[in-house]
Amino acid sequence: MVVVAVSAVTSVVSVSLYGKWMHKGDNNQADTSKTQVHFARFEEGVDNAGPVDFTKAATLCSQAVVHIQTHIGERQVKLQSDDNDPFAQFFGDNSRVIPEQRGSGSGVILSEDGYIVTNNHVIKDADNITVTLANHKTYKATLVGTDAKTDLAVLKIDAGNLPFLLYGNSDDINVGQWVMAIGYPWNLDITVTAGIISAKTRTIQSETNPDRGETFIQTDAAVNLGNSGGALINTKGELVGINSALTSPTGTYAGYSYAIPVNIVKKKVNDIIRGATVKTSKS
């Protein structure tokens, strides 16, 4: 109660004195004998657009990000059955050959007829690739081509009228700009995280590709295993990067992640689809 009372009294006195000072200021000329104070300011001002809302972008863009699962080899699996089943001798050993799952990642639909971009390391050495859309429909994917230097790959599924993302311009992004990462980490369903661009033109090395020459977008949007190949989008819902790597002492997210700039992605994807010889940009 003492704190509240003192605060209230102080407020009343402050308001009273402030009112008298303002009244005096209205009736008197400014004292030009005193040194004027110039406050620091931004010449162009700061656009206070209010809280960032990714709701619409997340809803629309998530439909164009897919879950990629890769398999390599096959293995014989014996299904569980009753050893005393008298009919077992008539129907064989009750076993089945299934693909050996190798891993999973994410991808981004780039056209309504089913072209998808992902990371090369997601599909490397896979015998078969399956793509699951946000609506849970699953397709067998064909590998169109890869560019190991930039860690990009293009897939194609036999489908039409698909939702797809529009390219943004990664040259126009700025440090401090809000972005959102969309993908399938840890084999979870579609997941979105948000952060800011914390640096541009980062050059990194990875165990899977130590000679990577392109520069990366660094963000603090949370990215984990399975996010590789997923989308990095801006607040307009435009694709500005393909999530590709993270820096971590443990292998899980520890504060920073890296995306391939979309201007590089756009060029390489076009080269791959056209069947051109892909050359790595060192910009």
Image (cartoon, rainbow, N blue to C red):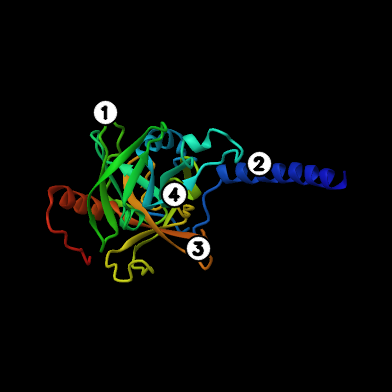
Q: Are marks 3 and 2 in contact (CB under 8 Å)?
A: no
In the displayed structure image, the side of residue 189 where residue 228 appears, left or right = left
The count of marks equals 4
- In the picture, the disc for residue 76 is 4
First along the sequence among labels 1 and 4:
4
Name the residue that disc number 3 marks.
Answer: 251
Name the residue that disc number 2 marks.
Answer: 19
In the displayed structure image, the side of residue 91 where residue 274 appears, left or right = left
Name the residue that disc number 1 marks.
Answer: 161
Q: Give the percent coordinates (x, y) of residue 46.
A: 42, 48
How busy is the neighbourhood of tag 2: few (under 14 within 10 Å), some, or many (20 plus)? few
First along the sequence among labels 3 and 2:
2
Disc 3 to disc 4, C-alpha distance: 32 Å
In the displayed structure image, the side of residue 153 where residue 73 appears, left or right = right
Disc 2 to disc 1, C-alpha distance: 67 Å
Amino acid type shown at disc 1: Asn
